[in-house]
Image (cartoon, rainbow, N blue to C red):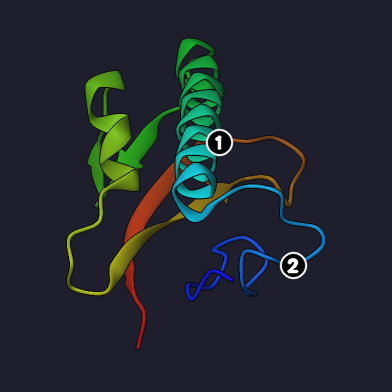
Amino acid sequence: MCPKKCILYGRSRCARRCRMGCDEMKAYVKKVILRERARYLQWLEGFEEKGIPIFIDDMPANRAEFPKIFENKGDGCCYMGDYIGVDEGKLTEIRFDRVWNY
């Protein structure tokens, strides 16, 4: 029986639903996260192409800066997206600001 808890199910590896070993599961989850990040960055680039401004920390951002929103600085902060104008029916800008997990 595997002494580690499964990162997906929170149980030991021998749980009925989990058929992968711990290292195999970590590699799978990492692959899924990278794929979803790439998909999200393409989505942001589509908005930029349509002329919708994107800001990171109150500064206009370009495509090269978009991956910054996924960085883990180790200080307990992450970026939260705010989609301005959605309530009125037309997206006018996208803002990413740092928030802290306290």
Give SS at disc 2: loop
Per the rendering, the mark at residue 32 is: 1
Relative to 78, does residue 87 appear above or below in the rendering? above
Q: Residues within 10 Å of mark 1 (few under 14, many from 20)?
A: few
Dividing the image into 4 quarters, which one contains the N terminus? bottom right
Residue reaching furthest top?
49
- Could you tell me the amino acid type at mark 2? Ala
Relative to 53, does residue 3 appear above or below in the rendering? below
Relative to 32, does residue 18 appear above or below in the rendering? below
Q: Residue at x 63, y 36 (%)?
A: 91
Give SS at disc 1: helix
Q: Residue at x 62, y 47 (%)?
A: 20
- Please name the residue that numbered disc 2 is placed on: 15
Which of pointers 1 and 2 indicates the residue nearer the eye? 2
Please provide percent x and percent y for residue 2.
53, 69
Q: Residues within 10 Å of mark 2 (few under 14, many from 20)?
A: some
- Could you tell me the amino acid type at mark 1? Val
Q: Residue at x 51, y 53 (%)?
A: 82
In front of the other: 46 or 40: 40
Dividing the image into 4 quarters, which one contains the C terminus? bottom left
Residue reaching furthest right?
16
Callout 1 touching callout 2 (CB < 8 Å): no
In front of the other: 100 or 5: 5
Looking at the image, residue 80 sits to the left or right of residue 74; the answer is right
Estimate the spatial distance between the alpha carbons at disc 1 and disc 2, rounded to whole Å: 21 Å
Q: Quadrant of residue 13?
A: bottom right
In front of the other: 69 or 30: 30
Per the rendering, the mark at residue 57 is: none
Which of marks 2 and 1 precedes in the sequence? Answer: 2
Q: Residue at x 24, y 52 (%)?
A: 57
